[in-house]
Image (cartoon, rainbow, N blue to C red):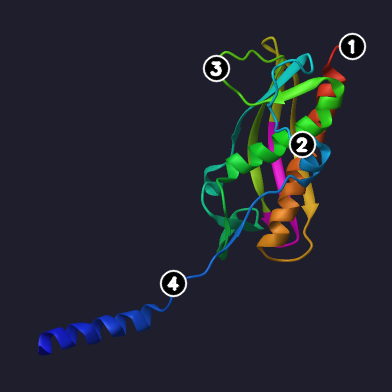
């Protein structure tokens, strides 16, 4: 009896020391502009293939390993990062990045006759976009920095290849402001890629 009582007291003491489980706030990248641009409820890549004549595929988006985690990163200096104890990404950041970028490319390119579709076996696109992200996090709660190398290829040839550096101001500190500015940064990257494709396409 005494042993059982001592065990209960010890467990109670351990719980009081550890305290309640931590509470997290979860955030996602948005794509409001792309959603608003489509009035028929169609999703990117939907349809029977009878739409625009050209097809663009967004390949995998490569993020640096330090962003492959739930806690939001924040850059304090050129070589210093910290991770939030409370703010978390609700989905893998590479998948979220590709989703928002794909929506923005679709919004800008569909009126030009380019259909943005997901990559799949057997699909031979007219254009293939690849993105390598070098940096994608808030800098001192002031602005989100997005540095990325990207290429547009067609028929095995490179039509455009650039390194873009995007800086989007934050409305304030915290996860909500970081997620909103991060979304705008990805959309701006999409706008730059779309402009490059418009300039590189032959007249149709």
Highlighted range, magenta: 138-149
Residue positioned 65% across, 37% down in the render: 98
- Of label 1 and label 2, which has the lower sequence position? 2
Residue 204 picture quarter: top right
N-terminal label among 4 and 3: 4
Q: Dots 4 and 2: beta carbons under 8 Å?
A: no
The residue lying toward the viewer, choosing from 1 and 88, is 1
Q: CA distance from mark 4 to mark 2?
A: 38 Å
> What secondary structure is marked by label 2?
helix
Task: Give how far across and how far down residue 132 sits, in percent.
Answer: 63, 34
Direction bottom: furthest residue = 2
Q: For the residue labelled by badge 1, is the local secondary structure a helix, a strand or a loop?
A: loop
Q: Could you give the CA–CA distance between mark 3 and mark 1, rounded to whole angstroms?
A: 29 Å
Q: State if disc 3 and disc 2 touch (CB < 8 Å).
A: no
Report, in whole angstroms, how far the alpha carbon at label 1 lies from the one at label 2: 23 Å
Q: CA distance from mark 4 to mark 3?
A: 44 Å
Question: What is the crowding at mark 4: few (fewer than 14 residues within 10 Å), some, or many (at least 20)?
Answer: few
| Marks 3 and 1, the one that precedes in the sequence | 3
Q: What is the quadrant of residue 87 in the picture?
A: bottom right
Residue mark closest to the camera, 4 vs 1: 4
Question: SS of the residue at dot 4?
Answer: loop
Q: Earlier in the sequence, mark 4 or mark 2?
A: 4
Tell which of 119 and 138 is nearer to you: 119
**Which residue position is annotated with label 2?**
104
Name the mark on residue 26. Answer: none
Asked if 80 appears above or below 53 in the picture, the reply is: below
How far is the residue under mark 2 from the one under mark 3?
A: 23 Å
Q: Where does residue 68 sit, x and y in percent of width and height?
A: 52, 46
Residue where numbered disc 4 is placed: 21
User: Which residue lies under the disc numbered 3?
Assistant: 121
In the image, taking residue 119 as reference, residue 50 lies left or right, namely right
Q: The N terminus appears in which quarter of the rendering?
A: bottom left
């Amino acid at each position: 009896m005494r042993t059982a009582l001592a065990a209960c007291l010890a467990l109670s003491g351990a719980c009081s020391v550890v305290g309640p489980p931590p509470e997290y706030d979860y955030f996602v990248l948005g794509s409001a502009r792309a959603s608003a641009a489509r009035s028929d409820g169609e999703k990117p890549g939907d349809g029977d293939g009878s739409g625009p004549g050209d097809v663009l595929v967004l390949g995998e988006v490569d993020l640096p390993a330090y962003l492959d985690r739930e806690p939001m990163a924040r850059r304090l200096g050129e070589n210093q990062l910290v991770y939030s104890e409370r703010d978390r990404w609700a989905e893998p950041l590479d998948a979220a990045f590709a989703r928002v970028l794909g929506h923005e490319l679709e919004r800008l390119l569909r009126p030009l006759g380019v259909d943005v579709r997901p990559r799949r076996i057997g699909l031979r696109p007219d254009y293939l976009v690849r993105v390598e992200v070098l940096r994608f996090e808030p800098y001192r709660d002031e602005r989100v920095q997005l540095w990325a190398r990207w290429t547009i290829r067609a028929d095995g040839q490179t039509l455009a290849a650039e390194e873009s550096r995007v800086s989007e101001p934050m409305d304030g500190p915290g996860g909500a402001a970081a997620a909103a500015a991060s979304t705008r940064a990805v959309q701006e990257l999409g706008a730059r890629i779309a402009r490059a494709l418009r300039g590189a396409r032959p007249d149709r």
